[in-house]
Image: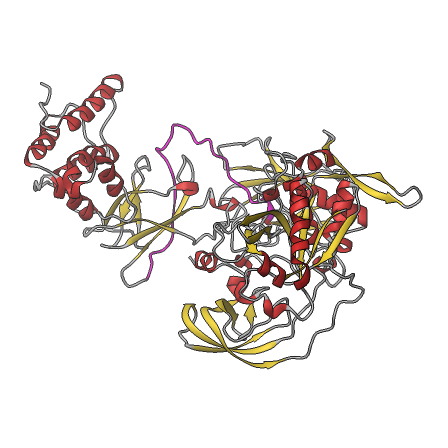
């Protein structure tokens, strides 16, 4: 006999479960579904909506007692009768935990079994993870967890946990979930511990998530940028995690390295700390490249899908290096003159949404004049960037610069071809110029880092371009017209502003440079940095007030009060004149 | 040299103190470092460096490290210099040297707090 509900929304929700049960006779209501139902009766609480109650009930860290109080606080007598009917007459079976929760809502003295004692390490996990993590620990303890299957490609340490739940007075916790990038998928490894009231913690417990989906389809993630290869000099290449406090991959995953020169394949199992076994090495030498494939034991067991390549620094590049790359800046060489960084091959799109100033981010190299100029060009004349760099479709790109031919007085084309190999930082992303998505070799927008690389190639090396310069030289090299520089002083502010205005209106790039020598003190706390170049993106004029709109080529760090920390800000012309020594533009 | 600040995650492990503080006094200034040579007028990122300083910090808030209300610290030779009244988040190592390429201007205060978790 169907239940006659007093609360129509509760009745409608229960009908949905009944309908699901008809098509799936194995359906049982678990904790998640019961929370959906009780949220509908808890909606009298503080005038909250049912969805607000549902969201509060699922908040990480909420104990069972707090959940019960929330529901009871909004429940009317007639709704209580509805819940009792679901318990006693409902046609959809309840899982034991869900039944106990409903009984507790109704204050029935249920024959609730005492919780099992926590494991000797202080934390034990029970059941599958269909509705989150459940288990037993000390009463009142908070539950901390990290998804160590998804963590490697982020920047998390293995103990960078999130609080996902709280044990109740009996020590139980349930429905504890990680969210966002950390959300559990079938087969993920979740590392957990309980933190007690006195601040001490249980031992770590690692759970392999089950019950979430029919199939584990998520392979082990690999932080390629943390794999450090070093030529050991005896036909061996040492392999290490160059940021040992973070993971290369999930514990227990297998990585297969294939030497692209010799074809030799070597497998290794990732250790409990997410790195390599002590002393792990490969057969190879400086300049060898290795493809890397991973398997979590379920996915990619044939190691056919590759994560990417890693190269042993130094020596002649292996046959995979399409174009010899410009040398590192001298600051990135060790005492023996060998590179302290490896290269990574970037294969992302040349442009994602055309060339934009925001695509440009300066790396760890003293060439601020270059990104400042490129961002200014991208803002003023994006087509010039589109015409500057071409994808050759074979892993190489040609950047066509302009150079003045002093014999004819005209500018001539200087094509420079580069490949997608960039010097990479230990934690991922290019060491030098970069764009958005820089930690992903397959997604980063390539035009800016490749144009910078081509400029270094043309001029000799990253060291050649990385010790200062003029944005006007870059304007010339890209646009093939002579650059100009105008000093700023108190007497020529109107002329400076007119020059900026004319250039911006004519869609020509403009940049500005700050003072360097002995002038550092004026910049501290100003939000503007000494010895630095900035793009000028525009101007504003309100009555007699004139403003200059600027962009820091770092893509961040600006005077306060300018909105998001994206490096874009405006200064009154008088303030601009105090902090900047010159503007650079095209003749 | 106007390089971007170092990634805070690389610097933070070396910080014995992270404090919100104000420069109360510059106690000493070291010799001027050598100037870059062959610099074209108007060039930027040429690597000008300011002298080392010994400064007294008035600590408003300790975000990491032993509680204190005052620190006497070394500002190394680098791309910035300090004067009384300068303020911000200071990362200081166990040898009482200010970390970060631009001292209190290296990272936005919110970024420092985020990195500290």
In x, y percent, where is residue A96? 19, 35
Quarter of the image for residue A333 reads bottom right
Query: As drawn, is B24 to the left or to the right of A162?
Result: right
Total tally of numbered discs in the picture:
0
Query: As drawn, is B61 to the left or to the right of A82?
Result: right
Question: Which residue appears at 59% of the width and 51% of the height?
Answer: A550
Question: Which residue appears at 91% of the width and 46% of the height?
Answer: A406
Quarter of the image for residue A480 reads top right
In x, y percent, where is residue A122? 30, 54
- The secondary structure making up most of the magenta span is loop
* Colour style of the rendered protein structure: secondary structure
Query: As drawn, is A311 to the left or to the right of A356?
Result: right
Quick one: A480 or A26, which is closer to the camera?
Answer: A480
Quick one: A568 or A189, which is closer to the camera?
Answer: A568
Question: Which residue appears at 41% of the width and 69% of the height?
Answer: B62
In x, y percent, where is residue A456? 76, 48
Quick one: A563 or A94, which is closer to the camera?
Answer: A563
Residue A341 visible, this angle: no
Magenta stretch in the rendered image:
A200-225
Residue A75 visible, this angle: yes
Which residue ends up furthest to the right in the rendered image? A407
Location of the N terminus of chain A by quadrant is top left
In x, y percent, where is residue A269? 54, 44
Which residue ends up furthest to the front in the rendered image? A543
Query: As drawn, is A483 to the left or to the right of A410?
Result: left
Q: Is residue B1 magenta?
A: no
Quick one: A256 or A86, which is closer to the camera?
Answer: A86
């Amino acid at each position: 006999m169907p239940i006659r509900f007093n609360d129509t929304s509760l009745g409608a929700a229960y009908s949905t479960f009944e309908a699901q049960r008809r098509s799936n006779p194995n359906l049982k209501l678990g904790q998640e579904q019961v929370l959906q139902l009780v949220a509908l009766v808890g909606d009298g609480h503080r005038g909250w909506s049912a969805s607000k109650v549902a969201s509060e009930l699922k908040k990480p860290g909420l104990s069972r007692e707090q959940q019960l109080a929330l529901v009871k606080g909004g429940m009317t007598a007639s709704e209580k009768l509805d819940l009792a009917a679901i318990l006693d007459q409902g046609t959809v079976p309840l899982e034991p935990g869900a039944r106990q929760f409903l009984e507790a809502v109704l204050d029935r003295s249920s024959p609730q079994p005492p919780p099992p004692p926590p494991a000797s390490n202080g934390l034990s996990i029970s059941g599958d993870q269909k509705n989150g993590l459940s288990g037993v620990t000390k009463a009142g303890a908070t539950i901390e967890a990290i998804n160590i299957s998804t963590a490697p490609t982020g920047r998390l340490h293995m103990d960078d946990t999130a609080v996902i739940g709280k044990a109740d007075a009996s020590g139980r916790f349930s429905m504890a979930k990680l969210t966002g990038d950390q959300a559990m998928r079938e087969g993920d490894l979740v590392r957990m511990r309980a933190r007690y009231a006195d601040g001490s913690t249980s031992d770590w417990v690692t759970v392999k998530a089950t019950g979430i989906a029919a199939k584990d389809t998520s392979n082990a993630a690999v932080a390629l940028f943390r794999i450090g290869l070093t030529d050991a000099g005896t036909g061996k290449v040492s392999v290490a995690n160059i940021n040992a406090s973070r993971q290369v991959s999930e514990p227990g995953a297998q990585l297969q390295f294939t030497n692209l020169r010799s074809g030799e394949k070597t497998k290794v199992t990732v250790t409990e700390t997410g790195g390599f076994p002590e002393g792990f090495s490969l057969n190879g030498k400086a300049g060898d490249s290795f493809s890397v494939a991973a398997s979590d034991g379920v996915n990619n067991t044939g190691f056919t899908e590759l994560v990417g390549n890693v190269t042993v620094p130094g020596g002649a590049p292996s046959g995979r290096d399409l174009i010899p790359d410009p040398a590192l800046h001298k600051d990135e060489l060790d005492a023996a003159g060998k590179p302290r960084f490896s290269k990574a091959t970037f294969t992302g799109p040349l442009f994602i949404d055309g060339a934009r100033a925001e695509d440009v981010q300066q790396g760890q190299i003293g060439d601020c004049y270059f990104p400042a100029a490129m961002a200014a060009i991208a803002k003023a004349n994006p087509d010039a960037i589109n015409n500057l760099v071409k994808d050759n479709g074979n892993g190489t790109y040609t950047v066509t610069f302009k150079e003045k031919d002093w014999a004819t007085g005209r500018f001539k084309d200087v094509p420079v071809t580069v490949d997608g190999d960039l010097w990479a930082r230990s934690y991922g992303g290019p060491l030098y110029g970069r764009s958005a998505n820089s930690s992903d070799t397959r997604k980063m927008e390539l035009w800016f880092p490749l144009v910078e690389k081509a400029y270094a190639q043309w001029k000799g090396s990253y060291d050649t371009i990385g010790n200062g310069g003029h944005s006007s030289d870059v304007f010339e090299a890209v646009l093939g017209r002579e650059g100009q520089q105008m000093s700023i002083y108190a007497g020529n502010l109107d002329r400076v502003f007119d020059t900026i205005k004319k250039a911006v209106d004519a869609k020509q790039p403009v940049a500005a440079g700050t003072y360097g020598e002995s002038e550092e003190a004026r910049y501290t706390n100003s939000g503007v940095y000494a010895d630095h170049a900035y793009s000028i993106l525009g101007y504003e004029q309100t009555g007699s007030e004139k403003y200059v709109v600027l962009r820091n080529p770092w893509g961040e760090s600006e005077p306060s009060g300018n909105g998001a920390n994206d490096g874009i800000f405006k200064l009154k012309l008088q303030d601009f004149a105090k902090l900047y020594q010159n503007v650079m533009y095209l003749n | 040299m106007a390089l971007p600040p170092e990634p805070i995650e690389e610097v933070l492990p070396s910080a014995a103190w992270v404090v919100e503080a104000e420069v109360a006094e510059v106690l000493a200034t070291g010799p001027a470092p050598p100037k870059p040579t062959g610099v074209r007028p108007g060039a930027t990122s040429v690597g000008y460096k300011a002298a080392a300083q010994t400064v007294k910090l008035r600590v408003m808030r300790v975000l990491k490290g032993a509680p204190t209300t005052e620190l006497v610290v070394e500002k190394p030779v680098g791309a910035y210099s300090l004067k009384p009244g300068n303020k911000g988040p200071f990362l200081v190592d166990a040898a009482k040297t200010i970390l970060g390429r631009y001292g209190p201007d290296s990272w936005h205060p919110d970024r420092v707090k985020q990195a500290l978790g």
